[in-house]
Amino acid sequence: MRRPDWRGIESFNALTETQAVHALYACCSSRIWALRVAAARPYADADALYDQADLILAELTETDLDEALDGHPRIGERSGSAASTREQRGVTGADPEVLEDLRKANAEYENRFGHVYLVHADGRPAGELLRILRQRLHNDPDTERRVLRLELAKINRTRLTRMLSPAAQLVEWAQ
């Protein structure tokens, strides 16, 4: 079924619990995050939603954070997610050598930290994302987890903003 035609915080507040959870899960693949953000409605304004989303993200357990990471493809890999495809548009058409370096660095990162490299890509070029990845490989695991949460918060905020905007794309809903 298609998402109801809604835009803005008032419309988001008026969604059923199930609709709100589905909309939020499309932003962040953590079930507990989506459930808790939906349960905190109504929000006075978009900023209140963003602040609550950030607070709940900061409180996620490591297991919940890993679940959220599972919803993100590797930088440079194709995905079935329209949001990820849009966010990685700066990687599309990159030089094959840069893409190969990105693939290798992704593998090194995953070997070192045990999870996908997550960065707020949002149209940044492949070379810049590769440079950031290489810098983050020098982080210790605790520092990298903190950086990862900050990057996920940026991604969530971008996706929440798009979700509330009139130009948001309709998404298919599971019944």
Image: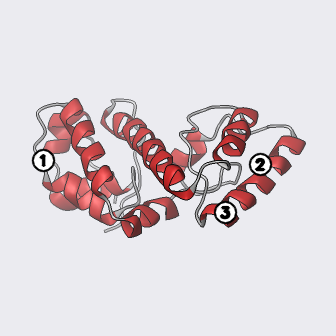
- Contact (Cβ within 8 Å) of mark 2 with mark 3: no
Labels 2, 1: front one:
2
Residue 41's tag is 1
What type is the residue that disc 3 sits on?
A: Arg
* 136 vs 7: above or below: below
C-alpha separation, residue under disc 2 versus residue under disc 1? 40 Å
115 shown above or below 135: below
* Residue type at tag 2: Leu
* Residue at numbered disc 3: 112
Of badges 2 and 3, the one in the foreground is 3
- Please tell me which residue is depicted at 58% across the width and 38% down the height of the picture: 121
Query: In terms of image quadrants, where is residue 150?
Result: top left
Question: Along the line of sight, which residue is nearer the eye, 37 or 20?
Answer: 37
Task: Tell me which residue sits at (72%, 37%) in the image.
Answer: 131
Q: CA distance from mark 3 to mark 1?
A: 39 Å
The percent position of residue 84, horizontal first and vertical second, equals 55, 47
- The residue wearing badge 2 is 102
Image quadrant occupied by the C terminus:
bottom left
Task: Find residue 19 and report its horizontal and vertical position in percent.
Answer: 24, 56
